[in-house]
Image (cartoon, grey):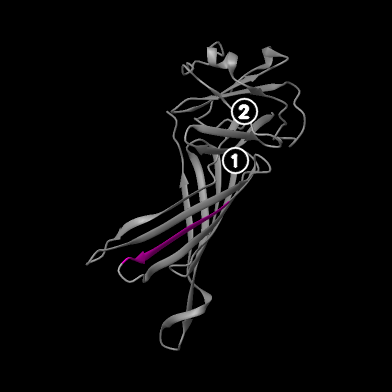
Amino acid sequence: MTANCLRFSLVLTGLLAVVSPLGAADPLRPARAAIPPVIDGLLDDAVWRQAPKVTGFKTVTPDFGKPTADDTIAYYAYDAANLYFAFRALEGEPAKIKASMASRDTIQSDDFVCLQLSIEGSASHGAAIYYASQPFAGRSTRASASVVYQPSEQWSETLSIAYASFDRTADGTRVYNYGIFRSRTTFQPNRFLLFRGIVEYNSFRRQLLTDFLASFTYIPGTVVHAGYGSLYERTRWDGERYMPGSSLAESRRGFFFKASYLWRL
């Protein structure tokens, strides 16, 4: 089984879409579709005859980064509302093409082509209202960004940050100012096992959260989950009660277990 994975970073400005494939030196600029293509599995629409194409992809699994035995061609286009992608996956031995019975999105046991899109960040600044018992006007700033690293089909790492602040208009007092930093790691060694780890720090609450989850899926609907998590807070014990402190101390921990079985009649 092989998988060809087409990875894009996507930047949208107005109606302009700049799409760059993994490892390409120059950006790929999609064609503007005068008439939207019909989503029917056929590449006989006018837009696909005019759309640019890219090829030369490598395998993801089981041999990451290897040349494919048969070529895959990707076409790309856009209009005012959508981005469109089409794939022509060539096969030297068509008689061997097959698909297993599986739930939606459970395709890892067959040959497949995947498309990954990500918008990497956003920011806003402007007038806002702080809603409290006595609401007041101010200036709000919000920003977020994320980076996805996926060296193989099995392993994915996502790093993200979110920032927010609010200043009172009347006197310029800063009401709040905080950031949330999050790391999520996912590893799926095979179609049965999945491991996920999350680390998140919230500077407003002064808390660090760690969470680990392991899942075993025998068949769709028959799943076992087990997880463990801890919460760390900047507190200290003064002999009688917890007080705000400078060091992170574990304040909570928990274990999670869930199992489900699908009866087939």
The mark closer to the camera, 1 or 2, is: 2
Question: Is any atom of residue 110 visible in this view?
Answer: no
**Amino acid type assigned to the residue bearing label 1 in the image:** Phe
Determine whether, in the image, residue 59 is placed left or right of residue 157: right
Give x and y (percent) for residue 90. 68, 17
Residue 167 among magenta residues: yes
What kind of element bears circle 2?
A: strand
Which comes before the other along the chain, label 1 or label 2?
Answer: 2
For mark 2, what is the residue?
A: 113
Asked if the stretch drawn in magenta spans residue 104, the answer is: no
Mark 2 closeness class: few <14, some 14–19, many ≥20 residues within 10 Å:
some
Asked if one can make out residue 130 in the rendered structure from this viewpoint, the answer is yes
Query: Looking at the image, is 204 positioned above or below residue 119?
Result: below
Q: Secondary structure at mark 1?
A: loop
In-front residue for pair 28/155: 28
Task: Give the residues in magenta.
Answer: 159-169
* Image coordinates for residue 153, horizontal then vertical, percent: 65, 39
Name the main secondary structure of what is drawn in magenta.
strand
| Residue tagged 1 | 192
